[in-house]
Image: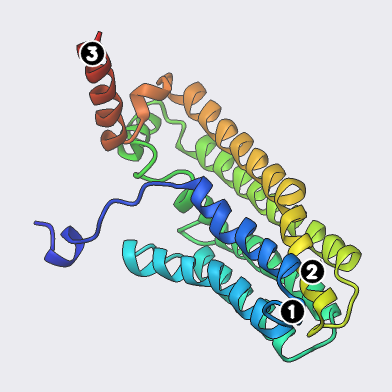
Amino acid sequence: MTSPSSSNVPDHKPRPWVDLLVSIIIPSVILMKFSGDEYLGNVNALVIGLAFPLGWGLFELIRYHKKNFIAVLGLISVGLTGGIGLLELDAGWLAIKEAAIPAIIGLAVLVSTRTKYPLVRTLLYNPSVLDVAKIQRSLEEHRRVDEFEERLRKASYFFAGTFLFSSIMNYILAKWIVVSPSGTQAFNEELGQMTLVSYPMIAIPSMVMMMLIFYYLWRTIRRLTGFTLDEVMAPHLAEKEKAKATESTTRK
């Protein structure tokens, strides 16, 4: 039976364009264009600019109960960025912070491979995406469980590698772009520029690598079980696909 609290939580639908607008574009424009004394000023522009991704992240956590390790690290990252600017710490700390967050996640992925709950299983091989129970039964029937676990471990190493890439690129980007003293208009403008540049230079390549890892995992499942993607989709996703197909047929 579903608890009242869980039944009141609305379904969370991915909104990548809204995420991009609120977390990247608006803060960047505020920092680059409104940090001057004739507008918001250095401190106000920094606080308001960082308030958008911080507020959006908190909204997602509270509204949809999306409490996960990466979301919390994201909120910490935004808070640290604001602290460096408001406390006027050396800009070098920004580069360290930018590298540290993905490095911590990557390390957590590696450590998790030695536990019963590797993060790659939680994030990519989970019941919300795939029919894990069905896949597991087939693996056991074909006696391929050990081989699959070895492939899952390799996927974890690849997964950790994406965060290592992000860590290195974040550090290089921060050292290259943010060179002015923190607490100044120039610092805010450079911070906004770094935020904009980081999306095409880091976020998109990381997303592509994540998709390749999922494809590697899917190809492994396909080879070891013989199932097609439609056959191992999570039941709720399969039902949605059927509903869409039925609706499309009805319209025709």
Task: Name which residue type carries label 3.
Answer: Arg
Q: Nearer the viewer, residue 114 or 175?
A: 175
Q: For numbered disc 3, what is the local secondary structure?
A: helix
Task: Name which residue type carries label 1.
Answer: Glu
Answer above or below: position of 36 versus 152.
below
- Residue 177, quarter of picture: bottom right
- Few, some or many residues within 10 Å of mark 1 (<14, 14–19, 20+): few
Q: Read off the residue under disc 1.
A: 38
Residue 82 x, y percent position in the rendering: 66, 80
Task: Name which residue type carries label 2.
Answer: Glu
Circle nearer the N terminus (1, 2): 1
Instruction: Give the CA distance from mark 1 to mark 2.
Output: 15 Å
Q: For numbered disc 1, what is the local secondary structure?
A: loop
Q: Read off the residue under disc 2.
A: 189
Mark 1 vs mark 2, foreground winner is 1
Q: Residue at x 49, y 51 (%)?
A: 18
